[in-house]
Image (tube, rainbow, N blue to C red):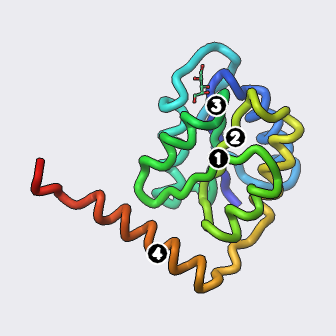
Amino acid sequence: MKIALACDHGAFDHKEAIREELLKRGFEIEDFGCYSSASVDYPDTVYPAVKSVALGKNEFGVVLCGTGIGASIVANKVKGIRCALVYDTQTAAITREHNNTNVLAMGGRLVTPDEAVEIALTWLNTLYPADPRHQRRIDKITAVEAKEGEHDERC
Ligand code: RB5
């Protein structure tokens, strides 16, 4: 399974810990940076990472910034991306089961690197059960996305 990773300086250690653990477990990683704890703007790393998921080059993405908020906002701007910002394993599992999320966001100032690894593994190891109730709701999200992409006559 191919995973896109991205972070800003607020979660560099977390991204490194996730990368090392996923590589040990046989995942393929595309690392979009950052590559040190020097300050960077999270859209610069997160956007190419989530775009690679939207284009099918990577199956899932894990994106991090200080809070995870900016990273999740960027991710959810990209068509085809369903990104959830979580801080624990319970919501990580639920968002795979209910929302079939393809990108996970976390905040380096809110969870430790070890917790981030555990949350990412929980999320990646939880299958989407394709329950019709949840699929209906996800289809409606996709419909909202399509409608927002249409030309707005009022502009
Ligand atoms: C960077 O200082 C910080 O704003 C960023 O990591 C993130 O928390 C934004 O949502």
Q: Amino acid at mark 1?
A: Leu
Location of residue 92 by image quarter: bottom right
Please report whichever mark, 1 or 4, sits nearer to the chain's N-terminal start.
1
Q: Which element carries disc 4, helix, strand or loop?
A: helix
Please report whichever mark, 1 or 3, sits nearer to the chain's N-terminal start.
3
- In the picture of the structure, the residue carrying the numbered disc 3 is 65
Q: CA distance from mark 1 to mark 3?
A: 11 Å
Q: Outermost residue, top direction?
A: 38
Q: Which element carries disc 3, helix, strand or loop?
A: strand
Location of residue 114 by image quarter: top right
Q: CA distance from mark 1 to mark 4?
A: 20 Å
Q: Amino acid at mark 2?
A: Met
Left or right: 106 in relation to 121? left
Left or right: 78 in relation to 58? left
Q: Are marks 1 and 2 in contact (CB under 8 Å)?
A: yes
Confirm or reject: label 4 Cβ below 8 Å from ligand 1. no
Q: Name the residue rendered at 56%, 43% in the picture.
A: 72
Quick check: 51 above or below 96?
above
Q: CA distance from mark 2 to mark 4?
A: 25 Å
Q: Name the residue rendered at 85%, 32% in the picture.
A: 112
Q: Name the residue rendered at 42%, 68% in the picture.
A: 142
Quick check: 138 above or below 124?
below
